[in-house]
């Protein structure tokens, strides 16, 4: 978007540079509050704090090693009922920013007075890995992210190709920057205003950053493609799919933690699916047996049909799954394909309408079953020929 | 092969109350026949059809789901069929990605006057599903 | 003595139907005289000359409704015998003979057809007319019928009588509307086009009919040999026919082009050529089709003369034509499709004799100047194609406009639908489902073992009662069924019957008579889904059981609710004080409803500089009528500052020089007009000899005249910038050209297509008057230069000297103002920047379906009229304004209004709703909004047409249709799979 940014000195590392910069913004009243991950006092997790006292920034981390709560959920909770009068900066991962954009389209967040600030993201560790030994986890994360090594990160992070600038207002570019510096990149007029207020002239060329991002994006895209191909081979068809989901215990944690699942009560927990015994007996009769609790596959496929168009592949669902089902990986695959069908990328821009709200009159003809009017059920072979010709 | 010949699919034919159903009425008025195993399910407009209602029968016992609403521009409510088309595309995309045979879902416009097209669709879809064979999900107890 | 309240409608064109509907809805009874023996035997324009193959069966619904409610007396085989009296107190005498089959008693069992011993051309002497796909139209071919009476004996409901007596009836009516139908030119009229002389020549209307008026299929162009032709010639016949034989409305060029595009869709390899003299798709929207045809590879040939010559025995004809340069060509095709015009009405002389109405010089019914439907006789009106060739939208508009003109002759309202029976509150009762299976007077028994079915249904979970009933669609059986339901004591009902769209009302009646809310009942299309479409008895039984099981599961979870109502502010707001706004304000106010008129300028009247003296006088009369009306408040130099609310309940703030004024209104009429295109180039503004048509008219009024005048058409029309034909310019230019010729000037008209339209053929008159016509190519406008001798128009190698060069400039929307108003009103602009009048997402000019759809509030109570809607002539501007006024009058007096679907509306579970607004975005009727305080979606009931878009978009069923909730659907689906 922008070809100019500013350079922020970061001799003591990215984290402290960003924290220092935010502190300044807070004390200069450019922002009234920050929504930022902060290490919990017990030191074994991170939580979003709505932070107004700059002194409390000490334990804050713009790039925590894990994502226990998807930041968009925090943003949604804060701004669901409208734009506040105070200016808040939310320091989130790119996937969290993208989910926030989806939620804004769904009226579950309001961004007029909220600045989305993102950082080039190396991924996060699987929550369970980290919890085993938070100190070692943090060190492992720091070390790997330094080298942009995604191997210890979550599987969806390993194949993430939207790790850099999404539609955030301000972005911290760590890729391609000179030793001891980072880029601050405005992504919207709103973001530019902040930089102006902070006295940060847009005078730094971003070519190096852009080139590095592009290069890494290509690598990631290829990884994603390869991973999806492998994944698809594993889950293909009813057998593969049911094997993957057979350990599901219907806890619906994946849905509960999903940032874009915004319903008060999930459809799959609603009265529509709570049926009298005869219904279950009849179904068990047809199938020979019926697994309980029922509707596992309907839940996953049905939920996909409700949210994959807004899915940002953030991986929170997989972190939350007590049965280690690769649900985020499956959904990232579904999301990519479904969004591609509509030329949509979740979280790309506030301007893109949600695919099921919009339509074109002249589109998607591939789903319309062609009709050969001479089909009378008799000359099937002939008709097939005609269909092929058509 | 002979097994498949014997196989009688269970087919849900989702129809809008206007054109899709109208096609059925015209077919009946002209005494056109189609297979008994095609069972109609009516919604007010295909634009009122949630995705779950396409997915549910495919898991619970249908071998195929066909959907017929008004032709483009004919929708009683202006644009329901365009919205339906997007939803069907979404469902088909999900089924396709999961290798769950998206060809078990058909979306074809049928107008009120098109009795022939209505029975052709029912018949042709039935033949098509017969050739595909039974939907493996319908006999899986672990869904 | 007060005036009569009933209206006689003679003929069944679309305008007549629309007028009937408007009258019925506003509380007046009407008598409909149909000259045919069944409902649409007399093809009206839309049926005979449908430019587009689309389904619009729903457009017919209102008729059924009014017959059922008792507002309509429809008479078949009718003939008007005598008219006496005067406006307000006509006495009419007419004869009628009922339909052979009374379709209100007919169950469509087809036994009459089965027993008929006479077979002609592969069908029986009694048969169903398939073309009238929407009602059970059984007719007897009396030429071959032996009057054996077998059909009558076998009819189970007595609906059929072979010999119906001819009856002569008399009635007192307040007004008469003549709405006689369209007449196609005969084969003889089309003899120059080889119609009837070769299998390779067919009418376009026949192609549409073979496509079942729905979807264009290849079979409809199949040749008798079975071959699908590969070369097509589509000929617009009135452009080449003898004068006076057929008249053209502007639809024809569009029809031809549209047919060509559809042919290319279906047969991409085919060679398709359209032959016309000029492309006359005037008005907004239509030019796009022309472009689309060219993009699709259709060849458009502009010919001077044309003739089709058959080839003996071959499925091929040759089109002989001359091009503009006079050169003769031949073009052989395998199929020639004739797009034909309209013949003058054959009934005209008879109607003149009976009623005193007069014909115009072309044989159509004459209408008073500046009226829409007033004939020369007070109290007698004429609508639709009877008064001349016109497009389908105009025909329909006339129907509603007629209401405004007719009402002043009518007495008090004399029709009010009876209130429904009281419904029982069953919310405290345990669910008891009753299944009632129709035996259709014996028809169903024969095809399926009903007692076995009954037994199996009895065993279904949740079924308290099963019973086989005789029928539920004739008066006595409806009553009997209601009794049976009541006696059984059930509180949920599944009726296994047949439910073509028209019978739903009957079933609702039966269950409501039994005290049950229809939301607790389900009607299965037993006949359509089982009886008539299958043969295997065992499988039919299985399927019946599955359908019933599904119905039972559905009604078990049903929830009763009454029809919600909302109030309607009986005031109208008109924005714009030009001709359209003045007309609408005047018509609404005259009928007793207060109107607020807001005008941007200092004075009313709009762009008077473009009007003729006569027109100006008319507008001045209107201005004084509006200014003197007690119930019209005018604010000049004012504009809308704020608009909140929705149809029926708008709260508007009008900014006036004296400050803001709040206005509450039920409807908003947008009559903000448009502007004349300001030309660029052609030396306009640089040379005093170059002017627009309007400027020319001003000069002519001052008596100025010159020897040589050149006119350039399409300046600022059909260009990249203004992608439509402005409709007015050709007529206006040619009128001026003829007037100039009368003064002795030489006139040359440079044109791309001459798109005149209407009853007066100005093109022919201009040619006869000696106006010279020079065509220029689409992409190359002539140059205008000044040289010593005067002005010079250069068109390729051709140079024409002129003293004046007159530019025919189009009408362009007032973009800035329209944009602002569009946002304020939340009402869309169309592709061209005008206000779109009905929610129409398809690229046709307001498809007929939308116009006939009886939902006045489909556009949320906002009615764009006049030039704000589209380029229109003076008369058409009046028409659009009166149409809007008519539609407003239908709803504005209602006070409290239920939704069009009564209790069948969408609703919201507040406890589940997150206020995400998806339903608001997809609702096509603006029937939803977010309650900002609670952050939940809400429904404006009478804007809701129960389409269910909101249901499908809502991820967690917080949105639901009251007659089919989420809880019902899954259970019903599962039950269907058994």
Image: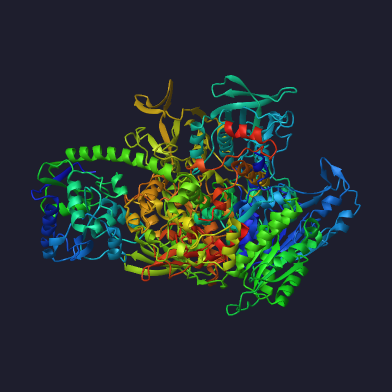
Of residues B121 and A193, the one drawn nearer to the viewer in this rendering:
B121
Residue closest to the far front: A132
Q: Relative to residue C645, is residue A50 drawn left or right?
A: left
Of residues C497 and C134, the one drawn nearer to the viewer in this rendering:
C497
Q: Position of residue C502 (x, y in %)?
A: 67, 59
C760 vs A195: above or below: above
Is residue C1 in sight in this rendering? no
State how the image is colored. rainbow
Q: Relative to residue C832, is residue C483 drawn left or right?
A: right
**Residue C2, quarter of picture:** bottom right
Of residues A339 and A332, the one drawn nearer to the viewer in this rendering:
A332
**Residue A74, quarter of picture:** bottom left
C236 vs B26: above or below: above
Q: Position of residue C74 (x, y in %)?
A: 73, 60
Q: Relative to residue C680, is residue C418 drawn left or right?
A: right
Q: Quadrant of the C terminus of chain C?
A: bottom right
Q: Position of residue C352 (x, y in %)?
A: 72, 51
């Amino acid at each position: 978007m922008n070809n100019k940014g500013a350079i922020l000195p970061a001799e003591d590392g990215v984290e402290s540079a960003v924290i220092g910069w935010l502190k300044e913004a807070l004390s200069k009243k450019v922002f009234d509050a920050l929504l930022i991950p902060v290490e919990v006092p017990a030191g074994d997790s991170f939580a979003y704090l709505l932070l107004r006292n700059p002194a409390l920034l000490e334990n804050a981390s713009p790039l925590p090693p894990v994502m226990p709560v998807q930041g968009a959920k925090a943003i949604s909770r804060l701004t669901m009922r409208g734009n506040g009068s105070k200016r808040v900066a939310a320091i989130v991962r790119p996937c969290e920013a993208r989910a926030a954009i989806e939620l804004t389209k769904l009226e579950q967040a309001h961004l007029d007075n909220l600045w989305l600030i993102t950082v080039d993201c190396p991924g996060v560790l699987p929550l369970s890995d980290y919890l085993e030994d938070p100190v070692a986890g943090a060190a492992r994360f720091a070390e790997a992210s330094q080298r942009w090594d995604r191997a210890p990160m979550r599987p969806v992070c390993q194949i993430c190709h939207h790790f850099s600038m999404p539609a955030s207002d301000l972005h911290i570019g760590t890729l391609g920057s000179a030793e001891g510096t980072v880029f601050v990149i405005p992504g919207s007029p709103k973001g530019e205003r902040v930089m102006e207020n902070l006295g940060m002239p847009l005078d730094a060329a971003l070519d190096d950053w852009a080139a590095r991002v592009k290069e890494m994006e290509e690598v990631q895209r290829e990884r994603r493609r390869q991973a999806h191909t492998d994944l698809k081979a594993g889950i293909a068809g009813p057998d593969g799919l049911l094997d993957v989901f057979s350990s599901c215990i219907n806890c619906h944690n994946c849905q509960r933690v999903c940032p874009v699942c915004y319903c008060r009560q999930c459809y799959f927990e609603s009265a529509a699916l709570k049926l009298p015994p005869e219904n279950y007996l009849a179904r068990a009769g047809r199938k020979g047996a019926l697994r309980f609790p029922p509707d596992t596959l309907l839940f996953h496929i049905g939920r996909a049909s409700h949210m994959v168009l807004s899915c940002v592949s953030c991986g929170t669902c997989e972190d939350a799954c007590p049965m280690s089902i690769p649900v985020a990986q499956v959904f990232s695959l579904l999301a990519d394909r479904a969004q591609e069908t509509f030329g949509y990328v979740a979280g790309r821009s506030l301007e893109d309408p949600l695919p099921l709200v919009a339509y074109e009159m002249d589109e998607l003809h591939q789903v319309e079953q062609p009709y050969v009017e001479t089909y009378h059920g008799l000359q099937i072979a002939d008709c097939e020929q005609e269909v092929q010709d058509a | 092969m002979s097994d498949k010949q014997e196989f009688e699919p269970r087919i849900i034919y989702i129809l809008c109350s206007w054109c899709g159903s109208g096609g059925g009425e015209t077919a009946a008025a002209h005494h056109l026949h189609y297979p008994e195993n095609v069972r109609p399910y009516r919604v007010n407009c295909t634009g009122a059809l949630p995705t779950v209602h396409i997915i549910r029968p495919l898991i619970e016992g249908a071998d195929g789901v066909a959907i017929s609403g008004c032709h483009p521009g004919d929708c009683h409510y202006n644009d329901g069929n365009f919205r339906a088309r997007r939803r069907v595309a979404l469902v088909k995309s999900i089924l396709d990605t999961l290798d769950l045979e998206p060809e078990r879902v058909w979306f074809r416009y049928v107008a009120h006057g098109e009795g022939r097209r209505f029975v052709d669709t029912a018949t042709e879809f039935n033949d098509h599903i017969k050739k595909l064979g039974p939907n493996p999900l319908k006999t899986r107890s672990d869904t | 003595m007060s005036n009569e309240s009933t209206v006689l409608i003679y003929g069944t064109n679309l305008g007549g139907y629309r007028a009937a509907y408007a009258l019925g809805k506003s509380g007046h009874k009407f008598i409909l005289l149909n000259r045919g023996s069944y409902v649409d035997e007399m093809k009206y324009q839309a049926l005979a000359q449908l430019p587009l193959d689309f389904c619009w069966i729903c457009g017919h619904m209102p008729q059924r409704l009014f017959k059922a409610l008792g507002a309509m007396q429809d008479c078949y085989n009718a003939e008007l015998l005598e008219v006496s009296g005067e406006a307000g107190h006509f006495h009419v005498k007419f004869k009628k003979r009922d339909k052979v089959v009374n379709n209100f008693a007919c169950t469509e069992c087809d036994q009459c057809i089965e027993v008929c011993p006479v077979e002609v051309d592969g069908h029986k002497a009694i048969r169903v007319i398939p073309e009238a796909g929407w009602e059970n139209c059984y007719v007897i071919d009396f030429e071959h019928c032996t009057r054996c009476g077998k059909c009558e004996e076998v009819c189970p409901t007595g609906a059929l009588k072979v010999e119906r007596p001819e009856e002569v009836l008399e009635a007192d009516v307040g007004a008469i509307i003549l709405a006689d139908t369209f007449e196609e030119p005969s084969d003889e009229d089309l003899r120059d086009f080889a119609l009837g002389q070769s299998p390779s020549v067919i009418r376009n209307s026949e192609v549409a009919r073979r496509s079942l008026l729905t979807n264009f299929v290849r079979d409809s162009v199949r040749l008798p040999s079975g071959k699908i032709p590969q070369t097509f010639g589509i000929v617009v016949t009135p452009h080449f026919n003898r004068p006076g034989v057929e008249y053209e409305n502007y639809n024809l060029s569009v029809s031809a082009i549209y047919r060509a595009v559809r042919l290319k869709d279906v047969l991409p390899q085919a060679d398709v050529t359209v032959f016309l003299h000029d492309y006359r798709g005037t008005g907004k929207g239509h030019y796009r089709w022309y472009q689309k045809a060219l993009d699709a590879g259709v060849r458009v040939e502009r010919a001077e003369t044309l003739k089709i010559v058959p080839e003996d025995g071959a499925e091929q004809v040759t089109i002989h034509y001359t091009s503009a340069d006079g050169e003769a060509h031949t073009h052989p095709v395998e199929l020639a499709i004739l797009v034909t015009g309209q013949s003058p009405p054959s009934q005209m002389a008879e109607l003149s004799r009976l009623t005193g109405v007069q014909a115009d010089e072309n044989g159509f019914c004459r209408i008073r100047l500046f009226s829409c439907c007033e004939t020369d006789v007070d109290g007698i009106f004429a609508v639709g194609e009877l008064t001349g060739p016109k497009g389908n939208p105009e025909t329909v508009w006339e129907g509603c406009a007629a209401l405004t003109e007719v009402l002043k002759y009518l007495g008090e309202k004399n029709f009010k639908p009876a209130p429904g029976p009281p419904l029982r509150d069953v919310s405290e009762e345990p669910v008891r489902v009753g299944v009632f299976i129709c035996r259709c007077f014996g028809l169903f028994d024969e095809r399926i073992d009903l007692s076995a079915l009954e037994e199996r249904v009895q065993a279904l979970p949740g079924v308290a009662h099963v019973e086989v009933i005789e029928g539920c669609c004739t008066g006595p059986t409806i009553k009997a069924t209601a009794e049976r339901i009541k006696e059984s004591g059930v509180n949920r009902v599944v009726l296994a019957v047949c439910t073509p769209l028209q019978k739903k009302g009957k079933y609702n009646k039966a269950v409501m008579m039994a005290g049950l809310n229809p939301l607790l009942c389900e009607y299965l299309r037993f006949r359509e889904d089982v009886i008539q479409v299958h043969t295997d008895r065992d499988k039919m039984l299985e399927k019946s059981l599955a359908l019933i099981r599904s119905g039972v599961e559905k009604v078990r979870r049903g929830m009763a609710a009454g029809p919600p109502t909302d109030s309607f502010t009986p005031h109208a707001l008109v924005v714009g004080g030009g001709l359209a706004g003045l007309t609408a304000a005047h018509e609404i106010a005259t009928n007793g409803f207060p109107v607020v008129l807001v005008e941007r300028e200092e004075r009313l009247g709009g762009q008077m500089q473009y009007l003729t003296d006569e027109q100006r006088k008319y507008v001045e009369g209107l201005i004084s009528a509006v200014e003197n009306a007690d119930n019209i408040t005018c604010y000049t130099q004012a504009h809308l500052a704020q608009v909140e609310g929705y149809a029926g309940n708008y709260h508007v703030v009008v900014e006036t020089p004296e400050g803001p004024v709040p206005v509450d209104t039920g409807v908003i009429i947008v009559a903000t007009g448009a502007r004349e295109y300001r030309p660029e180039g052609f030396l306009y503004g640089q040379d005093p000899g170059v002017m627009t048509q309007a400027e020319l008219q001003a000069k002519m009024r001052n008596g100025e005249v010159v020897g040589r005048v050149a006119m350039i058409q399409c300046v600022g029309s059909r260009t990249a910038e203004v992608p439509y034909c402005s409709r007015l310019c050709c007529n206006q230019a040619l009128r001026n050209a003829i007037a100039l010729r009368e003064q002795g000037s030489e006139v040359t008209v440079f044109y791309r297509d001459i798109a005149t339209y209407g009853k007066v053929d100005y093109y022919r008159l201009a040619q006869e008057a000696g106006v010279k016509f020079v065509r220029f190519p689409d992409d190359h406008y002539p140059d205008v230069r000044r040289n010593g001798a005067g002005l010079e128009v250069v068109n390729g190698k051709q140079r024409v000297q002129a003293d004046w060069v007159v530019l025919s400039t189009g009408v362009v929307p007032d973009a800035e103002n329209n944009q602002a108003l569009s946002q304020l009103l939340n009402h869309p602009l169309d592709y061209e920047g005008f206000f779109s009048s009905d929610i129409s997402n398809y690229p046709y000019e307001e498809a007929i379906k939308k116009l006939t759809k009886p939902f006045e509030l489909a556009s949320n109570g906002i009615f764009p009229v006049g030039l704000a809607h589209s380029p229109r002539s003076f008369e058409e501007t009046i028409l659009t304004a009166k149409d809007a006024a008519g539609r407003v009058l239908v709803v504005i007096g209602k006070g409290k209004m239920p939704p069009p679907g009564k209790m069948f509306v969408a609703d919201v579970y507040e406890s589940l709703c997150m206020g995400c607004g998806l339903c608001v975005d997809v609702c096509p009727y603006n029937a939803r909004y977010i309650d900002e305080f609670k952050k939940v979606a809400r429904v404006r009931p009478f804007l809701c047409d129960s389409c269910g878009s909101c249901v499908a978009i809502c991820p967690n069923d917080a949105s639901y249709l009251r007659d089919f909730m989420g809880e019902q659907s899954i259970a019903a689906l599962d039950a269907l799979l058994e």
